[in-house]
Image: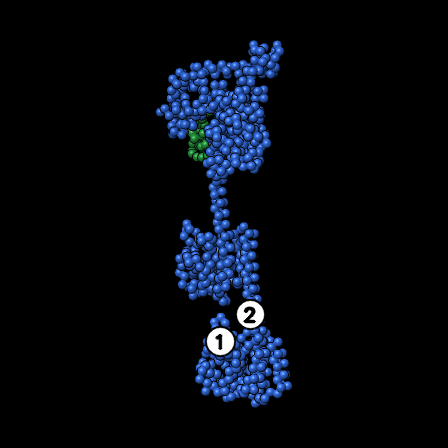
Amino acid sequence: MPSGTDLGAVMSEARGDHRACAPDNLQQILLDVSHATASHRDLQSLLDELAGLLRRVARFDRLAIVLHDPERDVMRLHTIVSIGPTYLTTLELPVADSPAGLVWQTQRPFVVPRIDEEPGFSEVTRILKAEGMRSFCVLPLTTPLRRLGGLSFASQDEDAFSDADVEILHELTSQVALAVDNTLHHEAAEQAQHQLAWKRDRLQLLLDVNNALVSNLDRRALFSAISACLRRVVSHDYTSLAVYDADRKAFDMWAIEFEGKGLIKEHMLVPVAGSPAGVAFTTGEPRRFERADLVAFESEVGAALLAEGIQSMCTVPLTVHDRRLGTLSIARLGGEPFTACDTELLASVASQVAFSVENSLAFQEIAELKDKLAAEKVYLEDEIRTEYNFEEVIGQSPALKRVLHQVETVAPTDSAVLICGETGTGKELIARAIHDLSRRRQRTLVKVNCAAIPTGLLESELFGHERGAFTGAIAQRIGRFELADGGTLFLDEVGDIPLELQPKLLRVLQEQEFERLGSTRTRRVHVRVVAATNRNLDEMVAEGTFRNDLYYRLNVFPITLPPLRERPEDIPPLVRYFVQKFARRMNKRVETVPADAMAALAQYAWPGNVRELENAVERAVILTSGSALRVPLSEFRARPAALTGVATLEATERQAILRALHDTNWVLGGPHGAATRLGLKRTTLQSRIRKLGIHRSTA
Amino acid sequence: MLRITITNRPEGVTLALEGRLAGPWVHELAGCWKTIGNASAICVQLDAVTFIDAAGKALLRTMHDEGAVLAASGCMTRAILEEIGR
């Protein structure tokens, strides 16, 4: 920045004392110049001192340093010292139009004894004449390494510079060139240092912002930390983060750091049109606004910003993977407007904040989905509980009570349970009851119907598979054992598990570990297994279609569900229960079950057990038009005869054996043993007991 | 779940029950009954009850013994009320 200095006293005094310079004086001046060049770091103070020293050599009233600007290839007035007022603050001329340019090119002194007679360099001569100068000379300002420009001397006297003066000044100018070069280097170094400091501050800011992003999960705390980091580098009074809400087509003010009048609040909606954020968001470019720009915004937020006293604002878009999320803004209540550097810095911060906002939005979505899933799980569990409500087991028969007692006994343990019983006796209901009364009730009961899944898929269904484990395994799949980890796995129709899969099932039951199909990684689970079957596993073991070791592992605590025909006293309450249930569902008013109908239902053998009874009652309720249940009695008189005989025989046999065992306190042999009472051999009785699945613990 | 709706009329108080009279809801009905007291005639409307467990049955029996009128239209509930009335 060129500037003029009035050296009035020194130079005016020196004007009349000009004399030729003796050699010893010259040496002294050279020493003084050398000393001056070593002691000044800025060109203006150097030139001030040099003007005084050189005045002892030559008569001049104006001294200026003109430097070549290599970037723009012009000669630029750098520093000026004048005895009188100077009108110049800055001057740049093409090399060809500047006397210093000529000297810079030719490296020879250029002397103009009378400015009035100089035909060239019109701009320079005009300025010098205006300042009262009448002669001037320019000497090359050159170091051994580079050409810098020229040192210009001007005088109010004509022909002020003799050849001897020029020769001495030329000699001194080489010293001055070194000083100028040093100073220029010093200035460049300072500028570079300043830039480095700025870059360091910027990197530190980005690091601090990054640290804030990873260490603050709370949105509010995170934004405060970012704002504090930013304030250390760019002064501001207001920070805001606006996130675009696609549903409402407006910005949601996510966070604001500003102690104002409260006109701009968090979570207020800001329209895209007519707002500073909208401009940056729509264009995708950072924007700077001054007060006049804010006045032009017609939206409520524009007025609010003005009312809060905002004088300047800088807004940058938050963009991730070409997706615009919102804007980050800073604003000032006074002082200078924001610069391009400030904008660049804010944009760097915004790119990091954008990732945080994206993560936050994704986290929010995940949390919402998680809540939804949890709600759905509660709903579905409730629905299952309603369908399989252990508390709503209907019946008061001793056989049923015995089963319920067994359930209550085994449920709190972690033992495997094998539920046997004919189809439709409620095996799943009992399995769910065991789970609900166990310590695992908070976790899931996972059901697998082994008979319903194709043999080839059962292994994958139970243990899961890795992607590509077999043709069609297009994605990884978690098996039921993993799903049931911590809970209970209900293996329905366990007798239908193929023989080749049984060792793997046995291993997971014993070791609680397995591998997914296509994986070598062993997974550990903690699963309780409740199995159920309507098949005779004893016979299957004997036939070799079911592994005996697996059978013993499953049969830790067997529960045999009595068929409905063995507890006929439970039929009337079950009928009434189902009548009421279906009547409500069908919006009918069925109040009574005729006695003959109830008797027929109670005498029927029910080979399909409770499920068959439920379906029969449903059908009867459909047929009913009045308040009394209409039961198609012919169905229940015609079919059961043959079935009833077989079933009753087995039931009777079971009852007789149980009674004999009870009366003899489970003594089988001997004259007072159960076998003698029943008229059987002991071994025959033992065989019958095994066949009927009678166990002392469950009897 | 059980919903109890209390209606005060000059001739007495009606407790209309909807849902399952079982588990913790038995205690809830008992508390409700206590707050009403014996001052007025009580009618327990059981039309919309889907299930009654043993404790619920016992409470209804107690209420019946103390003068409450139990009314129902469902097949199962009516059978239970008949059993209570015997």
Q: Indicate which disc, 1 or 2, sits on the residue closer to the N terminus.
A: 1
Q: Which residue is mark 1?
A: A75
Residue A307 at what x, y percent from top left? 45, 62
Quadrant of the frame with the C terminus of chain A: top right
- Foreground residue among A61 and A651: A61
Q: Position of residue A100 (x, y in %)?
A: 50, 79
Residue at the spot of label 2: A188
Chain A color in figure: blue
Please state which of the two labelled residues, at mark 1 or mark 2, is closer to the viewer: 1
Q: Nearer the viewer, residue B43 or A461?
A: A461
- Against A93, residue A22 (above or below) is below
Frontmost residue, A323 versus A497: A497
- Image height check: is A97 above or below A476? below
Contact (Cβ within 8 Å) of mark 1 with mark 2: no
Q: Is residue B77 visible?
A: yes
Disc 2 crowd, CA 10 A, few/some/many (<14, 14-19, 20+): few
Label ID, residue B80: none
Q: Is residue A501 above or below residue A363?
A: above
Q: Quadrant of residue A11 in the image?
A: bottom right
Q: Mark 1 belongs to which amino acid? A: Met
Vertically, is A329 above or below A418? below
In percent of the image, x 57 and y 87: which residue is there? A14
Can residue A660 be seen here? The reply is no
For chain B, what colour was chosen? green
